[in-house]
Image (tube, rainbow, N blue to C red):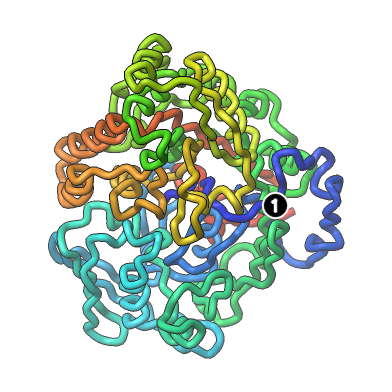
Amino acid sequence: MKTNIAGAFCRRTLLKAGASLGGGIIASGMPLSQAIWAAEGKVLRARANADLSKLDPAFVVTDAEVDVMHCIYSKLTRYKSGSEWGWELEAAEKIEQLDSTHIRFRLKKGIKFSGGYGEMTARDVKFSFERVIKLNSPMKPHWDLLDRVELEDDYSGVIVFKTPDAAVWLVPLPHAAGQIVSEHAVTTAVKDGGDFGMKPPAFSGPYILADWKPNQYVILTRNPDWSGPKPGFDEIRILPIPDVKAAERGYQAGDVDFTSISIDSLATFMSNPPADSEVEKKPSTGYVWIGINMDHPKLQDISVRKAIQWAINVPQILSAAYAGQAVLATGTVPPGVVGHREKALIPPEGDLAKAKEFLEKAGVKDLTLTIDCLNDSTSSTIAQTAQAQLSQIGISLEIKSQDTGSFWTLGMESEGDRWKDVQLFVMNFTGLPDPSEYVTWFTQAQVGVWNWQRFRSERYDELNVRGLSINDPNERATVYQEMQDLMEESGAFRFLTHGASPIVYRTTKVQAAMRPDGNPLYLEFQPVSG
């Protein structure tokens, strides 16, 4: 997903970019000791880069939401912590690949849903997975090749695919689309088993959602119905702080014990780390680009879009927004993942003379456009630098900075008509360790959902399906490289960076556990005694 469907995805915000955490959150008018910090027991305090807007796995928007879902629901499998991508059993007692299109699972007995909704069964697995397809949810691309789940008995079933799905073990099963919800609870709470938003009708993980104050905090406490392995903390308290600089100040003030930090602050944190802190630089699975809405009347001419692509100087943007520390992107697929391109079709520096030629070919003069972006410091700097660059070819760019609640619904047709006014935008998704995750959001089916460029290509859609059915990495790479070529050739994308994932945590408080990309695995965090 994106999200950052998915790291940066979110709909609400805690702090605007200008909100100061200078002396910690207390200094900005949020008395933590009164609000949430006065508690007994072992408490994990962490920062998320987005507030919650959904706890329905079929309608997840952000990685921050998935991090919470991992605590309150159960999946057949889950990600392993460490430096290598892998998975291990969670709700499944056993799971095995029978052939290229069939996976058999057997659930552990005794996993209870809260609220008196009984024991988890294979029927709940079937309901949860097939529901994503039935509801045509934003997470549908993760189960696009799913045909059905066949039931064998109360605890066993077979996941059946229409064609082989090479991504299944590291994308849908251990992530959002693999979360198992109670069929009885969901269909009781919502007609036709639809979106339950922020009101989970039942929990099945080690924690429950005890409290959520929008834009302020999330509190998870132990699930009294949980009979599995006991996690290390009695409570998990998560502060949504979208702006990374504000998060750094919050960490320095002692308000949180785990957070990501900005790339441009990494050198300072490494050379002079806060007391009792560990700083780690993780490889990023994110990708940042400037998108162009092909359907907007001002941008329907490909020569105009090409002019914009060639006018944007990527190294200048990375120097301004990331202090030159970010990894330059050649496409959506990052280095180290099958399908990464060695270079983009358009040189990263662009070419102003060529950009002017495209604009002249289009016969356009005095063009005024808008660029939407999040109101965090990095996104704003990207937009401001692009504004200066486009002015050199006679394009006037108006910056429209928005909070997360407004920004992340801009291109969604289900949220109103604002998508019709989208022109340029600064976008940031987070991927997973399979190349399909970096391309599936730009199919024709995703137009009006996550494909805000409104890019359409029959060839692209064919390759999207084909890539999942191939096991040979070299053959797969060719497919995903061609898909990125098609994206760039459309004139609707200017790829910028994959960033990086620097993390800091307090070693006197926590033993942190993370995916290889730095995303927290809260269930494996352990308190430090003393």
Residue under the point 43% across and 40% down: 285
Residue under the point 79% across and 66% down: 39
Give 423 or 278, whichever is nearer the viewer: 423
Residue 282 image offset from top left, x and y in percent: 49, 36
Asked if residue 283 can be seen in this view, the reply is no
Residue 122 image offset from top left, x and y in percent: 32, 80
Q: From the viewer's perspective, is 60 left or right of 263?
A: left
Q: From the viewer's perspective, is 509 left or right of 104?
A: right
Asked if residue 363 can be seen in this view, the reply is yes
Residue 136 image-quadrant placement: bottom left
Residue 363's place in the image compared with 487, above or below, is above
Residue 522 image-quadrant placement: bottom right
The amino acid pointed to by label 1 is Leu
| Mark 1 closeness class: few <14, some 14–19, many ≥20 residues within 10 Å | many
Give 196 or 264, whichever is nearer the viewer: 196
Name the residue tied to disc 1. Answer: 14
Residue 141's place in the image compared with 295, above or below, is below
Residue 234 image offset from top left, x and y in percent: 67, 67
Residue 247 image offset from top left, x and y in percent: 69, 42
Q: From the viewer's perspective, is 397 left or right of 25?
A: left
